[in-house]
Amino acid sequence: MIEPFLKWPGGKRWLVSRYSELFPQKYKRYFEPFLGGGAVFFSLLPKQGCLSDSNAELINAYHCLKTRYTEIERGLARYHERHCSDFYYKVREEQSHDPLKRAIRFLYLNRTCFNGIYRVNLNGVFNVPIGTKTAVRFEEGYLKTVAAALKRTTIRVRDFEDSINDAKRGDFVYVDPPYTVMHNNNGFVKYNAKLFSWPDQSRLARALKSADARGVLIMLSNADHPSVRALYDGFGTPKMLSRHSVLSADSSFRRSATELLITNY
């Protein structure tokens, strides 16, 4: 197990630390089409990984860590020495077409911005304010370990459906689409549409059911909401997980901040 190198909203460090027994023990290739911080990947460390996300800046950072981690280490060391409020906002405004510079900027902002939030405005410009963290560099040898794990993967900017459609019998797909668990029931669809639209939720369900028919092992994390449960009615085994309570399939034992987990194995 490797600690993820990113702070990422909705990350699943809690899932792998508390519910590791729910993951399959044997599978061929590992697919994660909503990569984000990659907590599940870095916990399982599969022999073959197919990692993807629609966030091009995120995927670029993974690519550069896989192939140029020593250059990233040097770049972050330089940024560490210069880190302050003025420097943060200067870097935040910078734009570059160079993949390495973009990766260093992405990691620097992620490590020093407010709560590790990734947020862009309507023009696609990162606009999160500076946070309180001051550590820019990683511990010595850490990025080398990350790069070694990523050597066994393919990493692509890709739509989730295309990635899931590539999975074959015996492969394992872990799916964690963007959603919020802190919602009121009436506003769920409207509010979550800003993160992941309902047509995309429906498209995801169809892709997973098709993969299930091909013999693909599937684990899905999603919002514990009636509309989502109805979408997957009859598919796999649903479990309601809480970060603060025990695993329960009985709604009477669930607290307000539960998440839905569905497996087909």
Image (spheres, rainbow, N blue to C red):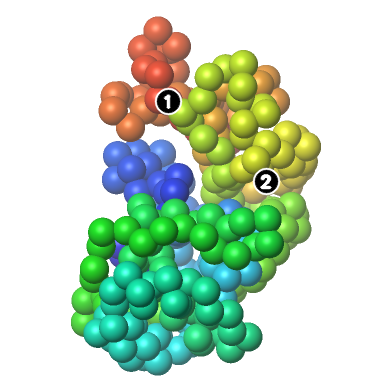
Label 2: state its secondary structure. Answer: loop
Q: Is residue 164 above or below residue 239?
A: below
Q: Which of labels 2 and 1 is toward the front?
A: 1
> Which amino acid, by three-letter code, is at mark 1?
Thr
Specify the quadrant that holds the N terminus. Answer: bottom left
Q: Is residue 36 above or below residue 188?
A: below
Which residue position holds label 1?
258
| Front residue of this view, candidates 211 and 41 | 41
- Residue at x 36%, y 61% (from the top left corner): 130
Question: Where, by quadrant of the figure, is residue 203 drawn?
Answer: top right
Question: Where, by quadrant of the figure, is residue 189 drawn?
Answer: top right
Relative image position of residue 148 (x, y in whole percent): 39, 80
- Residue at x 29%, y 77% (from the top left corner): 83
Q: Residues within 10 Å of mark 2 (few under 14, many from 20)?
A: some
From where the camera sits, is residue 55 visible?
A: yes
Label 1: state its secondary structure. Answer: strand
Marks 2 and 1, how far apart at CA: 29 Å
Specify the quadrant that holds the C terminus. Answer: top right
Furthest-front residue in this view: 86
Relative image position of residue 139 (x, y in whole percent): 21, 76
| Front residue of this view, candidates 130 and 39 | 130
> Which amino acid, by three-letter code, is at mark 2?
Gly
Q: Is residue 14 above or below residue 93?
A: above
Q: Is residue 123 left or right of residue 34?
A: right
Q: Residues within 10 Å of mark 1 (few under 14, many from 20)?
A: many
| Front residue of this view, candidates 221 and 116 | 116
Relative image position of residue 22 (x, y in whole percent): 41, 39
- Residue at x 28%, y 74% (from the top left corner): 84
Which residue position holds label 2?
215
